[in-house]
Amino acid sequence: MQEKISTTATEKILFANILRFLFWSAVGGITLYFIAGHLVKYSTKGIPDFFGDTFWNKSFWFYIHIAGGALAIIIGPFQFWKRIRIRNVHFHRTAGKLYIIGSILAVIGLVIILPDSLCMACRPSQFVVTPLWLLTTIAAWWTIKRRNIKAHRQFMARSYLFAFYFVAVRVLDKVGEIWLPSVKKDSGWYANTDWLVWVVPLIILEIYHTWWPSLNLKTVNKKTAGEVKNISSVT
């Protein structure tokens, strides 16, 4: 019996590790695509003309947004690497500070250039996700200062989700162009994909953080179990 339980636990750990590997491999692949397809293009061919014809116009803030966002996107996954968190605390803390700086710079740049964006249908979604990125990043810093590790990890996950939206939405649009050529890419398409690419992952993340632990009977702590026992004895 004990051997069967041990085998089941090992299988669960192995399955979780496989899912984690596939997930972060996908994140890494999408990030590389973004760097090769967008960052390299901006550095060699310049940025879109509608940001202004001088560097100190909106062009400067566009580069600030791109640089800060790239820093956050690249550093983010290392913050979730358990081995680094435990064995190299100094690196984890330094990387965390760089992530915060990158996120703040990216948000500031985005706030300035967003009114000039040509995608009018995308603006409602971007006006919501941008402050959420900033607020969850600040909340992650605030909670770790209070040594609330659980809340810190949850807010970091939310923050990275909002940061990664700016990468994922470009990939989703590209996938739509390749795999759904017959679908008209009008304002409705861009509005829907812009909301879809971060709202759905956020719902899944909140279910993982809050709903699933609450529904999992194995996570009931001794205090709660004691309270249930006392109520049963009274009734």
Image (spheres, rainbow, N blue to C red):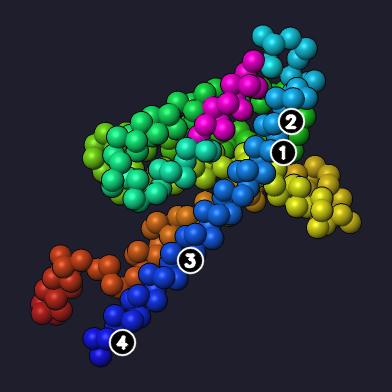
* N-term-proximal mark, 3 vs 2: 3
* Along the viewing direction, whichever of 2 and 100 lies nearer the viewer: 2
The residue lying at 28 percent from left, 46 percent from top is 87
Find out whether the residues at labels 1 and 2 contact each other: C-beta distance under 8 Å.
yes
* Residue 183 percent across, percent down from the top left: 85, 55
| Type of amino acid at the residue the image marks with label 4 | Lys
* N-term-proximal mark, 1 vs 3: 3
Label 2, residues with CA under 10 Å away: few <14, some 14-19, many ≥20: few
- CA gap between label 4 and label 1 equals 49 Å
Label 4, residues with CA under 10 Å away: few <14, some 14-19, many ≥20: few
| Residue beneath disc 2 | 41
| Residue beneath disc 1 | 37
Task: Relative to 52, say whether 105 is above or below.
Answer: below
* Along the viewing direction, whichever of 157 and 125 lies nearer the viewer: 157
Report the label total. Answer: 4
* Residue 93 percent across, percent down from the top left: 33, 34
Q: Secondary structure at mark 3?
A: helix
Q: Which residues are magenta?
A: 60-72
Which quadrant of the rendered structure holds the C terminus? bottom left
| Residue beneath disc 3 | 18
Q: Secondary structure at mark 2?
A: helix
Q: Quadrant of residue 224?
A: bottom left
Q: Is residue 108 left or right of residue 122?
A: left
Looking at the image, which residue sits at the far bottom? Answer: 1
Q: Secondary structure at mark 4?
A: helix
- CA gap between label 4 and label 2 equals 55 Å
- CA gap between label 1 and label 3 equals 28 Å
